[in-house]
Image (spheres, rainbow, N blue to C red):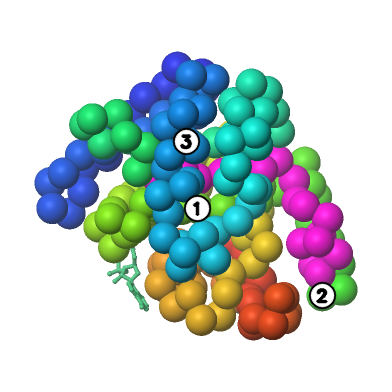
């Protein structure tokens, strides 16, 4: 998997290149995260966005999370999507309450994000489809969402449905309604 790089052609013919995050990407990733709008940050939060966290992530790759990035032709990061091996404990607890017991060795937890200026361009779908295919081809059987998805995040709910995810539960977090959605790959 290391050193792979692939190209994505968007609906408007712009291209983006897709690869895994590397140690040298810390500055670019930090800048990507800092530049996300307040709305996007409120919806995507698998880890803090401060420099110390980003540096620690880049210094301890690969870890148990696959971190895909897309870049524009100036090598700016324009999307960052995570696949964690297994599940985080809060998600697992909710699934257990729903009587859903997933084998964590074949479950991946997804957290996708696209830079605001590139949202709605088809980049998210093309990249996410690549990632789901990758998961399927490498033995994952289930995909779940990292912390669910906010019910009011209509674009993301639509996006997950488009990729075959179905709702398995709902929960309140931080005063907001959320959905748990999963996909059998
Ligand atoms: C969710 C996200 C990853 C999707 O990536 P993207 O590049 O914007 O998505 P795409 O352009 O590939 O597809 C968006 C789809 O949503 C649709 N859409 C856009 N706005 C919508 C809305 N308000 N309600 C419903 N659907 C909407 C688009 O029409 C498109 O669907 P289509 O292909 O059937 O036409 C991206 O928008 C993002 O990073 N959002 C902020 C962070 C976030 O919410 N992450 C998910 C956390 S659970």
Residue 137 x/y as whole percent: 54, 37
Looking at the rendering, the quadrant in which ligand 1 lies is bottom left
Q: CA distance from mark 2 to mark 3?
A: 36 Å
Q: Is residue 127 magenta?
A: no
Q: Would you call the spot at circle 1 few (<14 residues within 10 Å), some (14-19), or many (20 or more)?
A: many
Q: Is residue 87 magenta?
A: yes
Residue displayed at 72% across by 76% down: 173
Instruction: Out of 90 and 85, give the one closest to the viewer.
Output: 90
Q: Is residue 11 left or right of residue 89?
A: left
| Span shown in magenta | 79-95
Lower sequence index among marks 1 and 3: 3
Residue bearing mark 1: 112
Q: Dot 2: what SS?
A: loop
Residue displayed at 46% across by 47% down: 34
Would the CB of label 1 be found within 8 Å of ligand 1?
A: yes
Q: Is residue 67 above or below residue 60?
A: below
Residue bearing mark 2: 98
Looking at the rendered structure, the number of numbered marks drawn on it comes to: 3
Q: Is residue 130 above or below residue 184?
A: above
Determine if residue 122 is in view.
no
């Amino acid at each position: 998997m290391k050193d792979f790089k692939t190209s994505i052609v968007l609906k408007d013919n712009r291209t983006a290149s897709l690869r895994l995050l590397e140690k040298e990407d810390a500055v670019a990733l930090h800048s990507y995260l800092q530049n996300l709008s307040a709305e996007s940050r409120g919806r995507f939060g698998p880890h803090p966005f401060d420099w110390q966290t980003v540096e620690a992530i880049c210094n301890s790759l690969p870890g148990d999370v696959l971190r895909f990035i897309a870049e524009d032709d100036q090598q700016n990061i324009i999307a960052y999507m995570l696949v964690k091996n297994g599940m985080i404990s809060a998600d697992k607890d909710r699934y257990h309450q729903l009587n859903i017991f997933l084998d964590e060795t074949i479950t991946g937890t997804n957290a996708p994000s696209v830079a605001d200026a590139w949202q709605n361009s088809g980049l998210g779908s093309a990249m996410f489809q690549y990632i789901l295919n990758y998961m399927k081809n490498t033995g994952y059987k289930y995909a779940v969402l990292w912390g669910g998805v906010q019910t009011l995040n209509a674009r993301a709910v639509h996006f997950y449905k488009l990729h075959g995810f179905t709702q398995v539960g709902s929960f309140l977090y931080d005063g907001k309604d959320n959905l748990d959605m999963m996909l059998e790959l």
